[in-house]
Amino acid sequence: MQKIKFKIEQFGDFLIEIFHIVGLFVVGATIAWSAVHEYLVIMSQESGFASLKDILLMFIYLELGAMIGIYFKTHQLPVVFLIFIAITAITRFLVIDMKSLVADDSFNLIIMVASILILTIAAGVLRFTEKKYDNANECFK
């Protein structure tokens, strides 16, 4: 009975691993496809150059791709990359919609800047504690 249970658990683990690989491949391919499409749109603009908002969008795609790549290699989701993506997205929003943001209420600008500050502090805390707890987890492997 134990042997059958062990085989079933092994098969379940195999299916989960396949699901992770296929899922990550689909997400990674979607990110690459979207980034290439956006790049082609940028290159086809009549202005002949990329704006800052375009460059920041490409950074978001880069960070998403790097996050997927790290997960493929380590099987650990780098949460700090999600924070970097959020900071870049808020910065992009500030660059694009600064006039409308301040026109509605100048307090919105303070909220956006405070959000970036909080996210930056969170990223710093994650980086600082990452090594401490990563070493502690080595004992349990």
Image: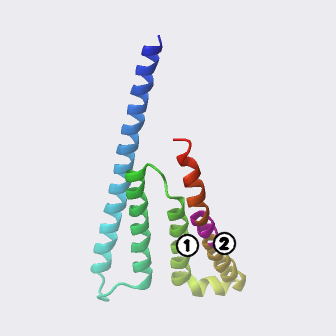
Residue 21 vs 69, above or below: the answer is above
Q: Are marks 1 and 2 in contact (CB under 8 Å)?
A: no
What amino acid is at disc 1? Ile
Q: Nearer the viewer, residue 25 or 107?
A: 25
**Furthest residue to the front?**
139
Q: Residues within 10 Å of mark 2 (few under 14, many from 20)?
A: some
| Rendering coords of residue 27 (x, y %) | 39, 53
Query: Looking at the image, what colour scheme do you see?
Result: rainbow
**Circle 1 residue:** 87
Q: What residue is shown at x 42% (from left), y 32% (from top)?
A: 13
Describe the element under mark 1 as helix, strand or loop: helix
Q: Which residues are magenta?
A: 121-127
Q: Residue at x 54, y 78 (%)?
A: 91
The Cα–Cα distance between marks 1 and 2, rounded to whole angstroms, is 10 Å
Does 121 sit left or right of 48 as displayed?
A: right
Amino acid at circle 2:
Ile
Q: Position of residue 88 (x, y in %)?
A: 51, 74
**24 or 5: nearer the viewer:** 5
Q: Is residue 132 above or below residue 86?
A: above
Query: In percent of the image, x 34 and y 67: which residue is there?
Result: 35
**Residue found at the very far top of the displayed protein:** 1
Residue 22 x %, y %: 35, 44
- Please name the residue shown 61% across and 75% down the image: 116
Q: Is residue 33 left or right of residue 53?
A: left
Q: Secondary structure at mark 2?
A: helix
Give x and y (percent) for residue 133. 59, 54
Task: Count residues near mark 1 (Cα–Cα under 10 Å), then give few for <14, some for 14-19, many for 20+.
Answer: many
Q: Is residue 114 left or right of residue 92?
A: right
The residue that mark 2 highlights is: 118
